[in-house]
Image: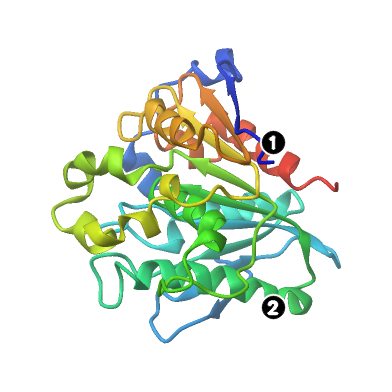
Amino acid sequence: MKRCATVALLTSITASAASAADPVELSAFIALARPEPTLQVSYGADPTQAVDIFLPVGPGPHPVAILIHGGCWSTVASGREQLRHLGADLAEHGIAVWSLGYRRANEAGGGYPGTFQDVGAAIDRLRDDAPTYHLDLSRTVLVGHSAGGHLALWAAARKGLPPASPLHVPSPFMSRAVISLAGVGDLKTFARFIPLHCGDGILERLAPPDRLTEVSPATLPAPEAPIVMVSGVLDRLVPPYVARDYARARQGKAGSVRLVDIPGAGHFDLVVTSAPAWADIRHLIQTALEAP
């Protein structure tokens, strides 16, 4: 018998700390210093088809946070470079980071199916390279921000893709847990906002109408991994109700969804290490990676 989806709402996390400062603006996020990764590996011929790896000090085996960057699925924003400061921070806390790049919807080879094939291939590459870099595949968490949150939710559900889909692979690597930071889980309900935020043509290239059921996490079979949907209460780009739309779509399905609202936080507070919200995000990551 299927387990009913569990939706738990945490309405107050670090309320006093997070509300002490104004939300982080895009300009401040762009201006952040971003350290170089420990190394990079390629999984395809395009420069964006590569992974930044951050390794902690010590022999390992290290738990792994798989990061997926946002940026409207578009080249208007930088790629995997935008999360390098998170990679350095997590590595300092003993967590290896596998931060993947992918071809965006408005570049050659991106959109459907390329963007999704890239995300799947980059995640599956982790399984092959884990012994080389002393990574513990029994302790992994998938973390995506904004558009990357959508892709993280999709990756967690891709095991349920129909065999005839070009996005289907026989044995995808499944992370133990998923944390979506201001991610979009239901593309259908959010579709009208994508042209406003991301520009014309992105949605059509990413999710053609006849393929929407393959790329919207809300329409795919429920992931086996538990899902945490994190929202900044003051997020004007992906407000908290977007996470609730996904949770509502998952009601009655297997698996679990937890909604976490961070007071005082905006869209970019969730991925800025100096913002009060980041301590809560890091704690969620560490908790997801604890030994069973």
Coloring scheme of the render?
rainbow
Across and down, in percent, residue 75 comes to: 27, 63
Q: Considering depth in this image, is 251 or 155 the residue closer to the camera?
A: 251
Residue most extreme to the bottom: 45
Q: Depth check: 136 or 186 in front?
A: 186
Q: Is residue 283 left or right of residue 200?
A: right
Q: Is residue 107 above or below residue 256?
A: below
Tell me the element at label 2.
helix
- Of 185 and 254, the residue lying toward us: 254
Question: Could you give the CA–CA distance between mark 1 and mark 2, rounded to whole angstroms?
Answer: 26 Å
Vertical comparison of 28 with 43: above or below:
above
- Residue picked out by circle 1: 283
Residue 51 seen from this side: no
Which of 125/168 is in front? Answer: 168
Estimate how packed mark 1 is, as few (under 14), some (14 to 19) or many (20 or more) residues with alpha carbons within 10 Å. Answer: few
Q: Secondary structure at mark 1?
A: helix
Q: Against 43, is 126 above or below?
A: above
Name the quadrant containing residue 22: top left
- Type of the residue with mark 2: Asp
**Of labels 1 and 2, the one closer to you:** 2
Q: Which mark is residue 55?
A: none
Q: Quadrant of residue 46?
A: bottom left
Residue under the image location 69 percent in, 55 percent down: 91
Q: Amino acid at mark 1?
A: His
For marks 1 and 2 on the same chain, the one whose residue lies earlier in the sequence = 2
Q: Position of residue 119 (x, y in %)?
A: 47, 67
Q: Residues within 10 Å of mark 2 (few under 14, many from 20)?
A: few
Q: Which mark is residue 129?
A: 2
